């Protein structure tokens, strides 16, 4: 059996409990959505969510994240149901991890290490593997005391992929040395990637960006007729893929990038800056949004904030609402739906989304709906960018 299959088998056997805190500035529905996303992350990693616990608090407890009463309630359930792992929807401090694990006696993960685990499982190229390992070691460093006792009794599974198994007997100095080595390795890879980008010539570059699992890889496959891995799981695509694309004799480069997500671990943002160079250096961004998702506007906001963080928000952007075939319009006589602010797809098309300065389209990549209109608009944007770069060749045929 392969190592990957062994991981998948181990992960599939892990039964998981989720824990979240509802703060005063957060609605319960919003918390539910975050925890639903966390459950999807656990599913992507190979686990099975058995129960979700939430507690209303002014702020998470400094020692145990949740209050004493809630901690005892979760502890009793974990023991009675023989739960393997408890996952918290925020990054836990080293002391919180230590205290909670002492109470529960099972594996404790937070959102950050769960995402890192999925990235470790998805990484294929040397660059992605190096970036993930660096992020894992940076996460591990302040938690080293906990990780010593924690890892000694682990048998793999969610949260334990990557350097976890190989760093049981390391000390702080060795980890710091390893971090320095990985940073140097990434610098070398970055120089190679920069050379590759220069060797691609002066073609206009278009990058697909968006929240994770919105259909970017499916759109990439449809446009470039490539075989980029696409799956209904979070972070199905981790390594950036670049393909040459031609529409009506107009060539350009199209790249598929890693999806964004709320509360993306800081270590990952830092380590993946080189991967995000494809976004920063693109001439045009296609911001893909899953219009069928009930909270797509929050996802859109998250992506825009991430683009601001990496300095790419001021580029030419095509806003592409995907999955219109999966959008469920409310019944006309459904008063409750109208009170909740739900609109028909046509209402959405006539709303602020289509009246802004950014070109906006509605498509279905899987059902091939409105694809010709999408290609036409993309052609015009690439042509305009090409004319700006080469003003004296606008009448030439490609």
Image (cartoon, rainbow, N blue to C red):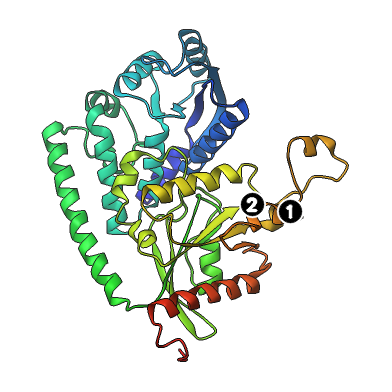
Q: Tell me: 323 left or right of 170.
A: right
Residue located farthest toward the top when viewing the structure as drawn: 69
Q: Label 1's element?
A: helix
Q: Residue 396's image quarter?
A: bottom left
Instruction: Evaluate whether residue 165 shows in this view.
Output: no
Q: Give the structural element (helix, strand or loop) at label 2.
A: loop
* Apparent side of residue 110 relative to residue 199 in the rendered image (left or right): right
Of residues 254 and 18, the one drawn nearer to the viewer in this rendering: 254
> Residue lying farthest bottom?
396
Report if residue 12 is visible in the image.
Answer: yes
Q: Position of residue 73 (x, y in %)?
A: 52, 12
What residue is at 49 percent from the left and 40 percent from the top? 41
Check whether the beta carbons of the residues at disc 1 and disc 2 lie within 8 A of each other: yes
Q: Earlier in the sequence, mark 1 or mark 2?
A: 2
**Relative to 247, 148 lies left or right:** left
Find residue 305 and name its label: none
Q: What residue appears at the point 26 percent right and 65 percent down from the top-left corner?
A: 193
- Quadrant where the C terminus is found in the figure: bottom left
Residue farthest toward the right in the current orientation of the protein: 333
Mark seen at residue 291: 2
x and y percentages locating residue 282 in the rendered image = 39, 65
- The image position of residue 27, as x and y in percent, is 60, 26
Number of residues whose C-alpha sits closer than 10 Å to that of mark 1, classed few (under 14), some (14–19) or many (20 or more):
some
Displayed quadrant of residue 31: top right
Pick whichever, 60 or 397, lies toward us: 397
Instruction: Tell me if residue 108 comes above or below residue 157 in the rendering.
Output: above
Q: What separation in Å lies between label 1 and label 2 (alpha carbons)?
A: 9 Å
Q: Which mark is residue 345?
A: 1
Q: Is residue 137 left or right of residue 357?
A: left
Q: How many marks?
A: 2
Tell me residue 61's x, y (percent): 41, 15
Residue drawn at point x = 73 percent, y = 39 percent: 341
């Amino acid at each position: 059996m392969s190592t990957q299959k062994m991981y998948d088998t181990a992960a599939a056997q892990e039964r998981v409990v989720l824990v979240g805190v509802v703060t005063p500035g957060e609605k319960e529905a919003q918390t539910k959505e975050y925890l639903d996303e966390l459950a999807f992350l656990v599913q992507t990693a190979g686990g099975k969510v058995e129960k979700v616990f939430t507690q209303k608090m002014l702020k998470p407890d400094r020692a145990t994240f949740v209050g004493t009463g809630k901690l005892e309630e979760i502890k009793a359930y974990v023991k009675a149901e023989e739960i393997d792992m408890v996952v918290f929807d925020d990054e836990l401090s080293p002391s919180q991890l230590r205290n909670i694990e002492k109470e529960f006696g099972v594996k404790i993960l937070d959102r950050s290490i769960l995402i890192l685990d999925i990235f470790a499982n998805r990484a294929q190229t040397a660059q992605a593997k190096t970036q993930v390992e660096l992020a894992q070691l940076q996460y591990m460093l302040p938690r080293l005391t906990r990780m010593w006792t924690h890892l000694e009794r682990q048998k793999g599974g969610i949260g334990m992929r990557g350097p976890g198994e190989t760093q049981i007997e390391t000390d702080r100095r060795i980890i710091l040395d390893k971090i320095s080595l990985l940073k140097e390795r990434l610098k070398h890879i970055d120089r190679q990637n920069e050379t590759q980008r220069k060797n691609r010539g002066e073609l206009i570059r278009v990058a697909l960006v968006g929240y994770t699992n919105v259909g970017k890889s499916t759109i990439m496959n449809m446009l470039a007729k490539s075989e980029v891995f696409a799956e209904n799981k979070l972070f199905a695509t981790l390594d950036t893929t670049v393909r040459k694309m031609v529409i009506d004799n107009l060539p350009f480069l199209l790249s598929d990038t890693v999806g964004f997500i709320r509360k993306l671990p800081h270590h990952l943002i830092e380590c993946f800056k080189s991967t995000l160079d494809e976004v920063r250096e693109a001439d045009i961004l296609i911001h893909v949004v899953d219009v069928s998702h009930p909270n797509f506007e929050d996802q859109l906001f998250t992506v825009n904030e991430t683009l601001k963080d990496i300095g790419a928000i001021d580029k030419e952007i095509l806003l592409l609402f995907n999955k219109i075939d999966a959008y469920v319009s409310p019944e006309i006589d459904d008063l409750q739906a109208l009170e909740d602010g739900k609109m028909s797809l046509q209402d959405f098309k006539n709303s602020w989304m289509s009246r802004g300065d950014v070109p906006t389209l509605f498509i279905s990549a899987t059902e091939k709906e409105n694809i010709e209109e999408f290609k036409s608009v993309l052609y015009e944007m690439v042509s305009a960018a090409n004319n700006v770069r080469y003003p004296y060749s606008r009448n030439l045929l490609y």
